[in-house]
Image (cartoon, coloured by chain):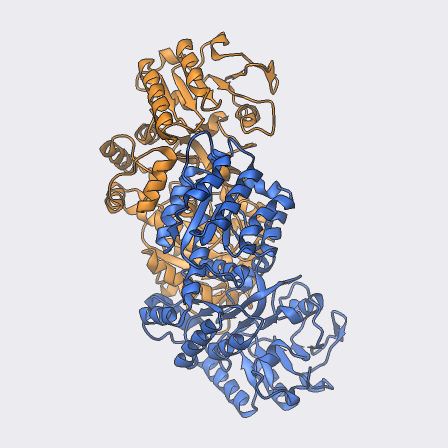
Chain colours: A blue, B orange
């Protein structure tokens, strides 16, 4: 990588946050019980290839790496300083970074604009220092960033590995932090980059979005917002630009209610402005999808990443469930989500007939439970999926897996990957199962077939895919 | 138990289905790969104390129990015959049951009213046989019933144990079946009785509801319906009666959309009638809660059972989250669910001050992540929960648990049980965790503190409790 001063001028300033060649970790710790222990620990475990400079007043080394008393003692250029000291010590460290000539900092501590008049004053003072020294700063009150490809991961949690993917995330506050173990280990989240903005003293969502929209490795962008801190028009323009490039943007906007807006104010000091319905309409017009809930946000971003470049060309879905009653529920869901029940032709019905019971049944929704009383599951899944791949009136598949699927041999699981390979998105669900906990589910997710714990989530994922195919 | 002919005349006819002294299992199997293997296997494992008569044409014994060639060969009275043979053999076995004088049967096979004209004719013929012989029949197309207290459990899945509780369920089709392992083992479902009605040839939801409304061990009733097969007015009267007795009824009604209604018809042959909005209004007026989705149905019935006789006296909720941003999201959710943010008095704020950071913060929503940078988690949870128990303006608590809670010692977990003990419902959530998989979560659930995988579910549970406190 070229030294930063020789960078191409068209490189976004955030690139240096995601791909630092050298990083100072101020407030690193040798105590595994402290959250700051993982600031250095994760970099080592994840194989970060840049130079790591732990900074500590008394320790000689941290996790085997030589420490420095202050950033100013570091004998080399530092691309990025991660400031993980207390809020009282943070302005002093920032000053030292300025003196050292460091141009990028992440401020982790909270206790500033969200902490009354005094905190606001201190943050304003830091903002001035940053501006005057041409420093770019993430935070304060931000754990950030993560770049899976380079193993660069600033987190208070022990992260052993992250599955690489094409999903990049922007958070206003560390919503993902207490979930990071679940998201990255159990949930089959395939991440590319993550930035947490905290109080947005300098870097804001417009900067972050501008960078990710141009990032070739980012295909899905998830954004959590309480307020728009930067230029609202530019923010919308960037979402439109991303959509035009085929990037899928999912937005979770909180602070919708009056009480929620007040809570947002007390938490990051951000004033939530504007009418929520105006925001909703703006998202639609720009081609972004608004997540309904926190769970929805994580479900949809995961699913859209796994679906990859696949799209749902029309809204006609084939359904297969174990209890027939579930087929009825899922048919209701289809309409709620703006999808429809595919009408399969007589040629398809003929293909399905070998796995009928001894009487005639409808082709869609398909009653797996019934047909499995008479035929081998392997034969049924294969027959049904083959028929639906060939059926021109079917755009996507929504299929319930049986709990015993967890015991199926992998060559059998391959049946489920065929639909996606043939260009037809498939959303599977298996009640009560966290995707990723079981070998068979991980196997499917690695092959870009997402598995959900409920039909509601599976259908919502297909609906999102359809939503984006039209925009 | 008195012989059935000496039963008190006021006993509901379904009692004999849930507490048979002797049961014939027709179509039992010695082959562990067959679903019918578990019909007898579960009864043995769950310690069913009645007499079991497996019926098989060729096997001498099944799982160590002597078999009979036909029900007619059984030398004693049979309270209930479970007919688990194929749909072609079912009418013949039913005839033999009639000849033997058996008065209660469960018909498992499908292939009748849902399977075209021929199936309809055969079902009508069976219905006639049942009527003429004063037999009461569950099904066909029904796996049923389960009575946890007596270890009586008719299921195609291996059930090793069921946590006893006060939740009873009525299903129109076996929605729970592919989920039974998850519901009963991983989800902390505390069950009392379960009845699956299938095609409702004889026993219908009005019968089932009439029985459960009078059942002293049933406190929460969950009903899944596609159609109302019995007397609609009586059904609504029974729900009102249950509500008046403090029973909480949750209804999942599918077949809402036109396509869904058509799917219901093909699946159980039931014609879904009437306007969905009329049904919605009727449920509200009767004091029942309508589940929004399959997931919602299982979440709410579980939560209401765990909350026990507790109610949410007002709608004022205290919130504590790890990321402050989650507090904003949950505050929005409160309004959506008809709850409100409790306004805590200055006396409460004074009690909380010892776990503040060095600046003033709001009491509600409470920023756990922030305060834990400065104080011991044990002290914070204890201070906050004690203060909220004493605060007269707080009716219930919604608190996010940290993933590390799974490692807490049990005496620490006891902090979370105190609120419920003091009459204030508490709903906890822990992102991405199936409740029941982890020792600490099971410990809480056993002490009637439900834990959810998302704030949406936790808030929805509190809202349901509030809904019922007013009805």
- Residue A269 seen in render: no
Number of labels in the image equals 0
Q: Describe residue A213's horizontal placement relative to residue B15 as left or right.
A: right
Please name the residue shown 71% across and 68% down the image.
A47
Q: Nearer the viewer, residue B194 or B322?
A: B194
Please name the residue shown 55% across and 27% down the image.
B38
Please name the residue shown 31% across and 56% down the image.
B338
Please name the residue shown 22% across and 34% down the image.
B233
Q: Describe residue B124's horizontal placement relative to residue A196 as left or right.
A: left
Would you place residue B287 above or below residue A110 in this image? above
Quarter-wise, where is residue A84 in the image?
bottom right
Quadrant for the C terminus of chain B in the image: top left
Residue A457 at what x, y percent from top left? Answer: 45, 53
Q: Nearer the viewer, residue B378 or A257?
A: A257
Q: Nearer the viewer, residue B393 or B146?
A: B146
Quadrant for the N terminus of chain B in the image: top left
Would you place residue A266 above or below residue B121 in this image? below
Residue A347 at what x, y percent from top left? Answer: 45, 43
**Outermost residue, bottom direction?**
A132
Q: Nearer the viewer, residue A280 or A198?
A: A280
Residue A154 at what x, y percent from top left? Answer: 61, 71
Residue A38 at what x, y percent from top left? Answer: 65, 67
Would you place residue B209 above or below residue A102 in this image? above
- Residue A383 seen in render: yes
């Amino acid at each position: 990588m070229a030294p930063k001063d020789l960078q191409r001028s068209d490189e976004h300033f955030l690139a240096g946050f995601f791909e630092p060649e050298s990083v100072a970790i101020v407030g690193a710790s040798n105590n595994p019980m402290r959250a700051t222990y993982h600031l250095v620990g994760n970099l080592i475990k994840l194989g970060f290839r840049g130079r790591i400079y732990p900074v500590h007043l008394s320790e000689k080394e941290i996790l085997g790496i030589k420490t420095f008393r202050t950033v100013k003692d570091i004998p080399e250029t530092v691309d990025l300083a991660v400031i993980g000291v207390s809020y009282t010590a943070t302005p002093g460290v920032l000053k030292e970074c300025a003196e050292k000539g460091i141009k990028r900092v992440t401020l982790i501590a909270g206790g500033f604009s969200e902490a009354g008049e005094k905190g606001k004053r201190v943050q304003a003072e830091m903002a001035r220092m940053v501006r005057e020294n041409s420093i770019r700063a993430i935070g304060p009150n931000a754990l950030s960033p993560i770049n899976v490809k380079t193993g660069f991961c600033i987190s208070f949690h022990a992260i052993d590995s992250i599955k690489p993917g094409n999903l990049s995330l922007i958070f206003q506050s560390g919503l993902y932090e207490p979930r990071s173990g679940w998201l990255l280990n159990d949930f089959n989240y395939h991440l590319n980059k993550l930035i947490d903005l905290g109080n947005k003293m300098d870097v804001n969502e417009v900067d972050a979005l501008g960078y990710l929209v141009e990032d070739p490795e980012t295909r899905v962008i998830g954004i959590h917002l309480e307020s728009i801190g930067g230029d609202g028009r530019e923010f919308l323009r960037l979402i439109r630009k991303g959509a035009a490039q085929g990037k899928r943007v999912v937005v979770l906007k909180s602070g919708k209610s009056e009480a929620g807006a007040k809570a947002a104010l007390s938490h990051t000091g951000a004033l939530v402005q504007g009418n929520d319905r105006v925001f909703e309409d703006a998202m639609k017009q720009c081609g972004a999808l608004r997540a309904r809930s926190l769970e929805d946000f994580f479900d949809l971003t995961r699913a859209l990443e796994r679906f990859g470049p696949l799209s749902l060309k029309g809204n006609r879905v084939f359904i297969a469930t174990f209890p027939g009653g579930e087929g009825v529920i899922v048919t209701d869901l289809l309409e709620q989500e703006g999808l429809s029940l595919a009408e399969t032709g007589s040629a398809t019905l003929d293909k399905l007939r070998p796995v009928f019971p001894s009487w005639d049944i409808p082709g869609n929704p398909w009653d797996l439970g019934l047909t499995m009383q008479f035929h081998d599951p392997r034969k049924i899944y294969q027959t049904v999926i083959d028929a639906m791949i060939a059926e021109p009136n079917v755009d996507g598949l929504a299929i319930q897996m049986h709990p015993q699927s967890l015991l199926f041999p992998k060559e059998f699981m391959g049946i489920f990957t065929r639909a996606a390979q043939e260009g037809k998105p498939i959303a599977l669900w298996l009640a009560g199962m966290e995707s990723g906990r079981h070998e068979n589910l991980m196997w499917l997710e690695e092959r870009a077939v997402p598995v959900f714990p409920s039909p509601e989530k599976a259908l919502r994922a297909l609906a999102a895919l359809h939503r984006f195919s039209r925009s």
